[in-house]
Image: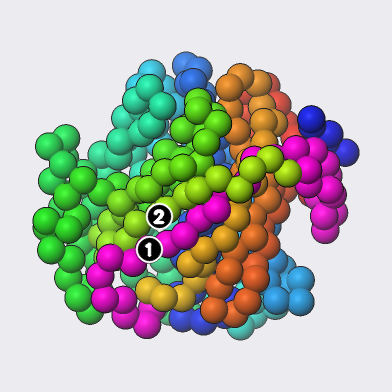
Amino acid sequence: MVRLSNFSRWGYRSLVLAAICFVAGPAIAADRVSTRVEIYGVLGLHVLTLHTVLDEAADRYTLTMDYATTGVAGLVIDETNHAQAIGRLTAVSADPASFRSNARRNGGEIRKSVDYRPDGIVEGSSTPAPPTPIAPAAARGTVDNLTAYFRLQRQLAAKKTCALTVPVFDGRYRYDLVFSDVGVQKLPPERGQAFDGDAIGCRMTRRRREHPDPEEVEGAQQGIIWYAALLPGDVVVPVRMQLDTQIGSVDGLLAEVHGRGVDLLLIK
């Protein structure tokens, strides 16, 4: 034991993007950290497995996320997603240069592509096209959803506070992710996860900026993510999350993390 002091249309995308498990902190040359997160839905059913990889080299980063439905969920909804963000590291934050996403669900597909220019201009597209296109002025100065959570984690590692609002545009939707402090809490072991210790809680709220279509309002709109230091250096890892969705409360548990000389298995 480690001790330290939905099944609706495209609904999983918003859910799992609130469960990103990247590590934040000073980069080591050719630094790679990989994680696996297990997501549980109503009645404790295992619905999804999420894999993430963070590569850092000098002042550059690449974030890669893959997930797929599993268990009973996989029998009902066959959904996968591959997304990647590439950008530049700053002192305590991150600025994206590009974002690509390809989501498939029961034969349907949504592809998103965004390029973020240094002058703040953002050029994005989605196939199929969104019901309501986002005006260029509304997308200016935004980041992708992967980088939004990465920014939170870098700030949390450096300043020990969750207070942050990040403007997001993923090629299809424009919204804000608002984070606030919950405080330090002691988390006991849960559902076979061998984590028992203090974690910093961050409350997440998704604030829509444009008129949403039915697809956008599905998935996680708010919740709490708990972070803890599991790897060497000034870094944090999200170890547990509880998200409110249209189908009820959904839980995420960090199952394993690898990197910086650590190979940690929390769920067998």
Q: Which mark is residue 36?
A: none
Question: Measuring 75% from the left and 38% from the top, which residue is drawn there?
Answer: 198
Q: Are marks 1 and 2 in contact (CB under 8 Å)?
A: yes
Give the crowd class for mark 1: few <14, some 14-19, many >=20 residues within 10 Å: some
Q: Position of residue 5 (x, y in %)?
A: 79, 30
Q: Secondary structure at mark 2?
A: strand
Q: Position of residue 206 (x, y in %)?
A: 42, 62
Q: CA distance from mark 1 to mark 2?
A: 6 Å
Check if residue 197 falls in the magenta segment: yes
Question: Measuring 88% from the left and 38% from the top, which residue is drawn there?
Answer: 1
For residue 128, above or below residue 137? below
Check if residue 58 falls in the magenta segment: no
For residue 99, above or below residue 62? below
Q: Which mark is residue 177?
A: 2
Magenta stretch, residue numbers = 186-215
Give the crowd class for mark 2: few <14, some 14-19, many >=20 residues within 10 Å: many
Q: Is residue 138 left or right of residue 52?
A: left
Q: Position of residue 180 (x, y in %)?
A: 50, 48
For residue 165, above or below residue 136? above
For residue 45, above or below residue 266? below
Which residue was labeled with disc 1? 207
- Amino acid type, residue under disc 1 in the picture: Arg
- Amino acid type, residue under disc 2 in the picture: Leu
Q: Secondary structure at mark 1?
A: strand
Q: Position of residue 241 (x, y in %)?
A: 64, 55
